[in-house]
Image: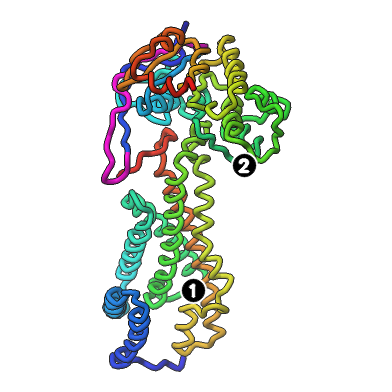
Amino acid sequence: MEPAIVCQEVHKTLRAGDGESAHHSAVLAGLDLTVGRGECLGVLGPSGSGKTTLLKLINRLLDVDAGRVLVNDIDVREWEVLSLRRTAQLVPQEPILFGATVRDNVTYGLTAAGREVPADGELVALLAEVALPEIALERPVAALSVGQKQRVCLARALALEPRILMLDETTASVEPAAAQAVLEGLYGRARRGDLTLLHVTHEVPKLRTLDRLVVLAEGVVAAEGPPATILARPPEAASRELERGRA
Amino acid sequence: MEGFVELTLPDVAIALLFVGVVAAVSALNRLFLEKGLLVGTVRTFVQLLAVGYLLKWIFGLDRWYAVLAAIAAMVAVAGYHGARRVGRGAGRAAVVATAAILLASVLVILLLFGAIIRVEPWYNPRYLIPLAGMIVNAAMNGASLGMATFANSARTNAGRLEAALAAGASSRTAARPYVREAVKTALIPTINTMMTVGIVQLPGAMTGIILAGGAPTAAVLYQIVIIYMIAAAAAASTMAAVLWYSRTFFTSAHQLRAEPA
């Protein structure tokens, strides 16, 4: 499998806190990771283990302190950064919406990229893909539930036809059956080789359906393997999160 | 002009009774403003007296470079002062504010003295210094309010800015709603002044001309020009300051810049 994402010896330190109490903490300390094209990878680890930081290094919301990150064999610092971000879409847990309506949001990335907005039929198909078939394009986003907002954010990401999709607890508030349907759709894209998926979550049912899991701890990959293996005997670093995720 | 009634230092001493009123209000309500009031009273006296003598000296000198140096000093102080309300990173904000105020002031002064108030010599300090002072002041207030508003909303909305960047927006596109909001907020006082001038307050320049014996109708024409010029200075300075300042919140790779503590 050719690699979609390669992280080599990645180091990243973040400044935490404000003013006087500010301190620097090493989040990633020499992380190595390769994600194959079309792979669906689960990322878990205790909070502060650098999961979100890793995703932000891949789409270059942050830069590495040392080491390098390659996307499609090209160092992310050599990519034109906006086209990198459109290729590698990150959808955070907190659903942040722009403009007034569902349409404003689904088309936000396309408009920002100066791309043509497709016909309504295609936009509705996108909403169906994120299990929002009943939502009208003109619906005000303020009236949506958190789970619906998360799916609108996901549709906004998919509208850009990304090759890499990074979900950071994106479906945490989506009703389980709907979430699983959405994820199955994404796995389908991945099996066709159209998409590489990174899913940060600690929800066991969602982890179980992925190709491979990696556990981050102490700034490196502490364990990796097929979901069945990792979930059967989880490393200590991940066990507490997984305990919560089984509920 | 008929000339006007000159004041002496004893007259000013009597005016201290006004300050006494403020002190009494503070004491009666236990506002504890007495110390600030004392400092303010002394500063008003010392600063204005010093400016009076400085201006007298510059008027006497009657040299273009002295006039320009005085205006440059105004711009520098305005730039420093205007950046003080942005919180963290006031240093880079001061550079932005100074540049924006300078740009706006030069533009407005060139138009004003090139096409409207034509004086001999071009650097006539009696005109250039007070008018430049009003222009620089308006430019400072606009830039200051605009930058402080932008800084505040950019910090509050850091998550939204980053979400917009993650969605593939450029830093310019991501910042646009906050730039717009900041420029609008900064220009509200200017627009309010234009709406109510002459009704709510008689502006300073007009009052000055009338006090100095000028006809009210002549004073009004001056004041109209001054209000327009102040609005232009505020708008140009605010626009330049907020646009440029917003750029300093991002790296060239469209990342949110980590702010210095």
Please tell me which residue is depicted at 46% across the width and 8% down the height of the picture. A228
The residue indicated by pointer 1 is: B117
Q: How many marks?
A: 2
Q: Nearer the viewer, residue B87 or B70?
A: B87
Residue B92 numbered mark, or none: none
Judge from the rendering whether residue B98 lies leftward or rightward of residue B112; answer left or right. left
Q: Is residue A231 above or below residue A20?
A: above
Please tell me which residue is depicted at 41% across the width and 62% down the height of the picture. B140
Pinpoint residue A36: horizontal percent, then vertical percent.
46, 10
Q: Which residues are magenta?
A: A17-39
The verdict on residue B197 being magenta is no
Viewer-nearest of discs 2 and 1: 2
Q: Quadrant of residue A232?
A: top left
The residue indicated by pointer 2 is: A142
The verdict on residue A37 being magenta is yes
Q: Separation of disc 2 and disc 1 at Cα?
A: 54 Å
Q: Nearer the viewer, residue A153 or A71?
A: A153
Residue type at mark 1? Ile
Which chain does tag 1 point to? B
What crowding class fits label 2: few (fewer than 14 Cα within 10 Å), some (14-19), or many (20 or more)?
A: few
Please tell me which residue is depicted at 49% across the width and 59% down the height of the picture. B186
In this view of the protein, can residue A109 be seen by the observer? Answer: no
What crowding class fits label 1: few (fewer than 14 Cα within 10 Å), some (14-19), or many (20 or more)?
A: some
Residue type at mark 2? Ala
Under circle 2, the secondary element is helix
Pinpoint residue A107: horizontal percent, then vertical percent.
63, 33
Pinpoint residue A4: horizontal percent, then vertical percent.
46, 14
